[in-house]
């Protein structure tokens, strides 16, 4: 057995206890040669507070407070193509929850299977009622 190293469980901080920026891949845009962005990770407490925000508020917090490079503002958000905001959200999710693409793909498959099962049950029920 290996004892957990606390450094593995924490985001890196500087001497002033500020979270250090990290580069993350936007694999959702291009798996072969994904662009990167430099971000300040979201600590657990803030992540939990953000879950109570509306989607637009969450997006703006990410863009304005957590993306270091390239720098975005509210005007950029309004003009941004949806797939880019989706890629940014997915990348932050993976960083914050420390999960990888395979984990997300497996979860999506599971949700699709559950949706298909629900649709099939609904169809069977409707046919029985006829």
Image (cartoon, rainbow, N blue to C red):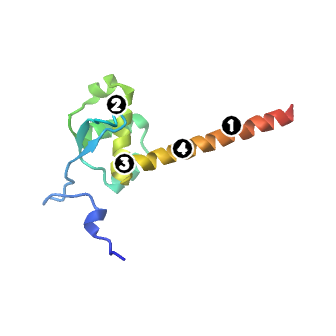
Residue identified by numbered label 3: 94
Q: Which label is found at residue 119?
A: 1
Inter-mark Cα distance, 3 to 4 = 17 Å
The first of marks 4 and 1 along the sequence is 4
Helix, strand or loop at disc 3?
helix
Helix, strand or loop at disc 1?
helix
Inter-mark Cα distance, 2 to 4 = 22 Å
Inter-mark Cα distance, 4 to 1 = 15 Å
Q: What residue is at 67 percent from the left and 42 percent from the top?
A: 117
**In this rendering, would 35 be left or right of 119?**
left
The first of marks 1 and 3 along the sequence is 3
Mark 2 neighbour density, 10 Å: few (under 14) some (14–19) many (20 or more) = some
Question: Can you tell which of label 2 and label 4 is closer to the viewer?
Answer: 4
Helix, strand or loop at disc 2?
helix
Helix, strand or loop at disc 4?
helix
Q: What residue is at 56 percent from the left and 44 percent from the top?
A: 111
Inter-mark Cα distance, 1 to 3 = 29 Å
The C terminus, quarter of image: top right
Q: Position of residue 65 (x, y in %)?
A: 25, 41
Q: Which label is found at residue 84?
A: 2
The first of marks 3 and 4 along the sequence is 3
Inter-mark Cα distance, 3 to 2 = 15 Å
Inter-mark Cα distance, 1 to 2 = 31 Å
Residue identified by numbered label 4: 109
The first of marks 2 and 4 along the sequence is 2
Q: Residue furthest front?
A: 32
């Amino acid at each position: 057995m290996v004892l957990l190293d606390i450094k593995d469980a924490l985001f890196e901080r500087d001497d002033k206890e500020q979270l250090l920026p990290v580069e993350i891949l936007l694999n959702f845009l291009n798996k072969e040669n994904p662009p990167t962005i430099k971000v300040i990770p979201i600590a657990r407490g803030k992540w939990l507070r953000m879950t109570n925000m509306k989607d637009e508020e969450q997006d703006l917090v990410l863009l304005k407070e957590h993306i270091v490079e390239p720098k975005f503002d509210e005007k950029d958000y309004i003009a941004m193509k949806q797939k880019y905001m989706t890629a940014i959200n997915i990348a932050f999710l993976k960083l914050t929850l420390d999960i990888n693409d395979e984990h997300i793909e497996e979860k999506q498959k599971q949700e699709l299977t559950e949706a298909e099962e629900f649709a099939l049950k609904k169809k069977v029920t409707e046919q029985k009622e006829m």
